Image (spheres, rainbow, N blue to C red):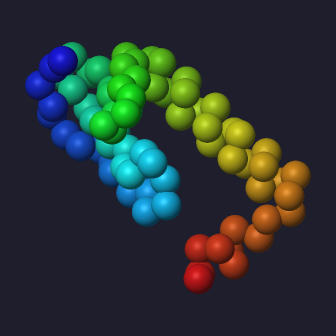
Amino acid sequence: MGVIQKILATAKFDTNKSEFIEIELNQGNIIHFQNDIFRIEMNLTEFIDFSSHVIMGANKLIESKNINVDEITNE
């Protein structure tokens, strides 16, 4: 474990066994995705690669399903 420098994000899931996920920036530029069930650790380069792939995947899903993002964000 390390010293948490900043909680980057927290997502709460009301209807999921995994009730939340925290994304932490730890000492030494180590990123933790964790909750009470799992913990994933990655360095900054791995985090940037992971984040880029998540964004690319989301964009492909939006495009393939013809999702209107403006309708979702305005609800």
Q: Residue furthest front?
A: 17
In terms of depth relative to the viewer, which is nearer, 39 or 45? 39
In terms of depth relative to the viewer, which is nearer, 72 or 11? 11
Q: In the image, what residue occupies the spot 71% across and 40% down?
A: 57
- Viewer can see residue 53: yes
Report the quarter where the C terminus lies: bottom right
Up/down of 46 relative to 9, above or below: above
Q: Position of residue 11 (x, y in %)?
A: 39, 53
Q: Position of residue 44 (x, y in %)?
A: 38, 21
Q: Residue furthest bottom?
A: 75
Up/down of 19 relative to 43, above or below: below
- Viewer can see residue 44: no
Q: Quadrant of residue 68?
A: bottom right
Q: Residue furthest left?
A: 3
Q: Quadrant of residue 71?
A: bottom right
Q: In the image, what residue occupies the spot 11% across and 25% down?
A: 3
Q: Quadrant of residue 67?
A: bottom right
Q: Position of residue 42 (x, y in %)?
A: 39, 18
Q: In the image, what residue occupies the spot 49% across and 61% down?
A: 15
Report the quarter where the N terminus lies: top left
In terms of depth relative to the viewer, which is nearer, 36 or 61? 36
Counting labels gives: 0
Seen in the image, is 20 located left or right of residue 48?
left
Q: In the image, what residue occupies the spot 73% across and 48% down?
A: 59
Up/down of 36 relative to 12, above or below: above
Q: Position of residue 61 (x, y in %)?
A: 78, 49
Seen in the image, is 17 located left or right of residue 54?
left
